[in-house]
Image: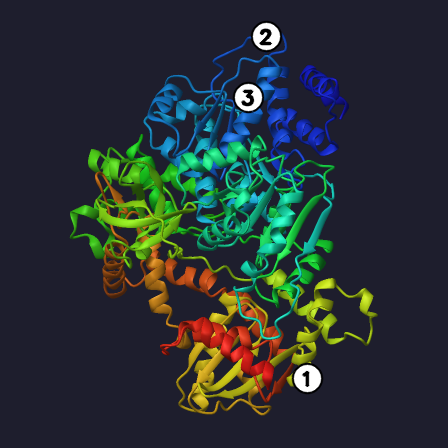
């Protein structure tokens, strides 16, 4: 450390910090030391402990050391620090913090932001004179690479920081970052410049070594991991309902506890209320105002479909503590530094340990502050998850992120990006692409197939000129067509969602965006809620939803696709272990040694034990029930909705070989139900065979309609790979048109080019992501080594009721309202 402490840059930064009454943390000084020595790496520290300054101040120290006599006056230095961030909301906040430092140090640096919100005038200004620091999203960085002579911008670049790397890794946006890094590094090498350092900034991730390896792959360095070793104190307090429903029904309890939330808001300076879905966040915002009208003007709503200006106002108002509470979704999950936030409330299961920690870290956003988070269950059994989360936090059981491999769609998009700027030479780019972690196993024949596809349309599409995008000019691969270049620029990115329509007031003013599938179900005159406002649909015109203000008390809350997250493997394991504590209750522990959540649920557990059984982590419980709806088979693996979806289909297929039955299937994160109109032949003699690992792959392929799932996956791959375009100059394709185009291409490839790389990718993504094949195999192996307990209760049990209710919700053919039917079932069970 002496070498660093003797440097002029360090003494200047240390003096500046001392004047503010601050001292650097050891992990920050360690990072500065490595940056001074030109070493790359990754910084790992809890939320709110100064990760940003560990890298940013390191870059400043390095610059001051290089220009000790004139660092204050030296201007127009070119791009020194490229800061890649996953969220637009983060860019503004990070930029504000950096500006403050530069101003106080009296340096002549400028900080620029480049994302979808950056104006054309600002982009033009940046093109003339690049700022010393450019804060940019992965998509905007690829748009930057689509400019002519982009390589010149990186001539003076010293350091690339990738913020919230744990959030990007394991996604196609992370792959975009890998490709961009490989290009920038090789641009500098080709100009005989020293390659830039790469630093990742990460909070919660289980496989930190893998995260470092993926990030630094393109520079071919091992790099270092700098750990903060600062344990953030987190207090988790569950909001316990006054009465426990022994027959819980998913989702409806949360709003009932709103009277317990209002005092928490009133006692705190500022509170963030995290809701898992945008639809429920709209409902919570309205209900809070209904129950506490005095909060009007002091409470706001924030999610990804609200228009940008309103979101920015909410973020600014949080900074200045003008708001008492904000109801939000994952849109405020990441590193925005909201210091006034004192308290966080998580409504419903966060489905993962790291997500819960990330949200908890929004409160007490400084190293010595305590982070306080309240857990509010949306049904009784979620209190078991609260107890499991507490155990997981104590054990620091953080989820890992698996890096993505061979994303051919992202590679095709990237090559088109290079082709619309300066063009590329295949041999040179192949070596660069192979230097990344994602494409290190890319085969020469796969590379040649991709090139053939870009130039000729490949084996299946060579008859169609639209797919012949790239021309070869003296060995240089280039897109010459201005129309194709503009179309490509409009579609750069890997986030593929259903077509989003703008929502505007007839009188003028932008409200936000809504998915086409939701709005297409409404008629003019229908009322819905968006951005906390009640709106009446007037008409849909030119991809815009025109609305007027509504005074109607009855409105529809929009539902957005993809709202159902699945339990992570780590939380599932802790949940199973927590049931051990429940099963052993009264034997090995005194009541006061149990979690308050589990004590609160004692009547529910007693009923479950009395009627059936409480499964331990080395047991699998199967229940048989009979009702007027048919014969129910309930299985409780506690592996999460996604694994249960595949597992239930495999089980239905395997039982179908024993007897020709038809099933309807329902599931939640705790288990799944097979419902048939005939008795289901599962007993002690065959249960173990149903969960065997033998022939699992073959049974997956036979039981799950992998072709149909791959067809749906292929739509996203086709959009990212540029086979179909979401947005063309002056128009936007409707979701159903996209699906039709993608299905047609899927059929063409399946028939004429069965080994096509994009087709292979679609099936691989179904197995890896949608069905989580590795986790599914692990679950079958675990169950194979467990005791299988089969129970035949006289009536529905507390564990089975939420799954059966969920099944009724989706398979309901009765004219009776689903809520009324479930409440009637609850009342009947309580009487019996």
Whether residue 399 is visible here, answered yes or no, is no
- Relative to 95, residue 776 above or below: below
Residue 99 numbered mark, or none: 3
Closest to the observer: 752 or 762? 762
* Image coordinates for residue 730, horizontal then vertical, percent: 21, 39
- Between the residue at mark 3 and the residue at mark 2, the CA separation in whole angstroms equals 19 Å
Which is more N-terminal, label 1 or label 2?
2
Q: Residue at x 41, y 43 (%)?
A: 306
Query: Mark 3, residues whose alpha carbon is within 10 Å: few (<14), some, or many (≥20)?
Result: some
Classify the position of the N terminus by image quarter.
Answer: top right
- Between the residue at mark 2 and the residue at mark 1, the CA separation in whole angstroms equals 79 Å
Q: Quadrant of residue 781?
A: bottom right
Q: Residue at x 72, y 22 (%)?
A: 4
Residue 236 as seen in the image, left or right of residue 348:
right
- Relative to 3, residue 201 above or below: below
Classify the position of the C terminus by image quarter.
Answer: bottom right
SS type, badge 3:
helix
Camera-side mark, 3 or 2: 3
> For the image shown, how many numbered marks are present on the structure?
3
Whether residue 592 is visible here, answered yes or no, is yes
Q: Name the residue tied to disc 2.
A: 70
SS type, badge 2:
loop
Which is more N-terminal, label 2 or label 3?
2
Residue 7 as seen in the image, left or right of residue 725:
right
Camera-side mark, 1 or 3: 1
Residue 610 numbered mark, or none: 1
Which is more N-terminal, label 3 or label 1?
3
Q: Quadrant of residue 237?
A: bottom right
* Image coordinates for residue 234, horizontal then vertical, percent: 71, 48
């Amino acid at each position: 450390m002496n070498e660093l402490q003797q440097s002029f840059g360090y003494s200047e930064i240390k003096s500046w910090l001392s004047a503010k009454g601050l001292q650097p943390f050891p992990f920050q000084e360690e990072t500065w030391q490595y940056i001074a020595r030109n070493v790359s790496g990754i910084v790992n520290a809890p939320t709110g402990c100064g990760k940003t300054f560990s890298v940013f101040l390191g870059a400043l120290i390095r610059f001051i050391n290089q220009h000790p006599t004139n660092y204050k006056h030296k201007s127009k230095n070119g791009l020194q620090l490229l800061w890649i961030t996953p969220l637009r909301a983060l860019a503004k906040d990070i930029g504000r913090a950096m500006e403050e430092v530069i101003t106080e140090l009296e340096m002549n640096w400028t900080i620029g932001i480049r994302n979808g919100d950056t104006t054309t005038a600002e982009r033009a200004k940046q093109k003339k004179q690049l700022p010393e620091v450019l804060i940019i999203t992965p998509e905007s960085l690829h748009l930057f690479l689509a400019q002519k002579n982009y390589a010149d911008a990186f001539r003076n670049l010293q350091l690339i920081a990738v913020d919230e790397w744990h959030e990007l890794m394991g996604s196609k946006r992370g792959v975009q970052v890998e490709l961009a890094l490989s290009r920038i590094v090789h641009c500098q090498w080709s100009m005989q410049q020293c390659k830039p350092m790469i630093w990742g900034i990460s909070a919660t991730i289980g496989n930190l070594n893998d995260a470092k390896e993926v990030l630094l792959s393109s520079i071919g360095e091992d790099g270092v991991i700098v750990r903060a070793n600062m344990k953030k104190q987190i207090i988790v307090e569950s909001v316990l309902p006054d009465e426990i429903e022994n027959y819980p029904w998913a989702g409806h309890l949360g709003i009932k506890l709103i009277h317990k939330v209002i005092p928490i808001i009133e006692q705190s300076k500022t509170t963030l209320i995290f809701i898992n879905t945008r639809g429920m966040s709209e409902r919570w915002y309205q209900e809070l105002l209904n129950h506490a009208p005095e909060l009007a003007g002091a409470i706001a709503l924030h999610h990804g479909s609200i228009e940008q200006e309103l979101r920015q106002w909410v973020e600014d108002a949080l900074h200045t503590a003008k708001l008492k509470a904000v109801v939000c979704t994952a849109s405020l999950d990441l590193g925005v530094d909201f210091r006034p936030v004192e308290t966080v409330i998580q409504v419903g299961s966060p489905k993962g340990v790291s997500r819960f920690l990330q949200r908890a870290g929004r409160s007490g956003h400084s190293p010595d502050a305590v982070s306080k988070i309240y857990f509010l269950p949306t049904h009784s059994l979620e209190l078991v998850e609260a107890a499991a989360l507490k155990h997981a936090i104590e054990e620091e059981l953080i989820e890992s992120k698996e890096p993505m491999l061979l994303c051919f769609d992202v590679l095709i998009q990237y090559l088109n990006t290079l082709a619309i700027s300066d063009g590329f030479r295949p041999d040179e780019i192949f070596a660069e692409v192979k230097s990344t972690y994602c494409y290190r196993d890319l085969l020469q024949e796969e590379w040649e197939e991709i090139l053939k596809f870009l130039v000729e349309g490949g084996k299946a599409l060579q008859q169609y000129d639209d797919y012949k995008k790239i021309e070869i000019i003296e060995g240089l691969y280039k897109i010459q067509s201005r129309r194709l270049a503009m179309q490509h620029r409009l579609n750069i990115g890997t986030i593929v969602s259903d077509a989003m329509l703008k929502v505007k007031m007839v009188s003028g003013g932008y409200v936000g965006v809504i998915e086409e599938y939701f709005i297409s179900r409404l008629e003019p005159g229908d009322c819905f809620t968006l951005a906390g406002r009640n709106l009446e649909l007037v008409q849909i015109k030119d991809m815009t939803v025109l609305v007027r203000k509504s005074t109607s008390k009855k409105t529809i809350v929009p539902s957005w696709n993809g709202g159902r997250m699945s339990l992570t493997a780590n939380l599932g394991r802790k949940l199973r272990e927590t049931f051990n504590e429940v099963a052993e209750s009264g034997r090995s522990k005194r009541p006061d040694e149990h979690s308050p959540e589990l004590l609160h649920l004692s009547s529910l557990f007693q009923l479950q034990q009395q009627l059936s059984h409480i499964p331990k982590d080395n047991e699998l419980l199967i229940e048989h029930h009979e009702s007027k709806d048919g014969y129910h088979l309930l299985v409780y693996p506690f592996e999460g909705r996604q694994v249960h979806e595949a597992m239930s289909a495999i089980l239905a297929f395997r039982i179908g070989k024993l007897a020709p039955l038809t099933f309807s299937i329902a599931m939640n994160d705790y288990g799944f139900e097979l419902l048939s109109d005939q008795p289901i032949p599962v007993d002690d003699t065959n249960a173990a065979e149903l969960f065997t690992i033998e022939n699992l792959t073959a049974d997956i392929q036979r039981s799950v309609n992998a072709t149909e799932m791959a067809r749906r996956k292929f739509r996203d791959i086709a959009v990212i790979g540029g086979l179909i375009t979401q947005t063309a100059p002056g128009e936007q394709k409707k979701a159903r048109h996209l699906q039709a185009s993608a299905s047609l291409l899927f059929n063409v490839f399946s028939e004429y080019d069965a080994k096509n790389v994009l087709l292979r990718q679609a099936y691989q993504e179904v197995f890896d992501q949608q069905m989580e094949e590795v986790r599914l195999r692990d679950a079958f192996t675990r169950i194979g080594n467990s005791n299988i307990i089969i129970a035949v209760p006289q009536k529905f049990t507390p564990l089975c009721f939420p799954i059966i209710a969920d099944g009724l919700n989706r398979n309901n053919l009765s004219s009776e309202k689903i809520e009324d039917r479930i409440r009637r079932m609850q009342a009947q069970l309580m009487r019996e």
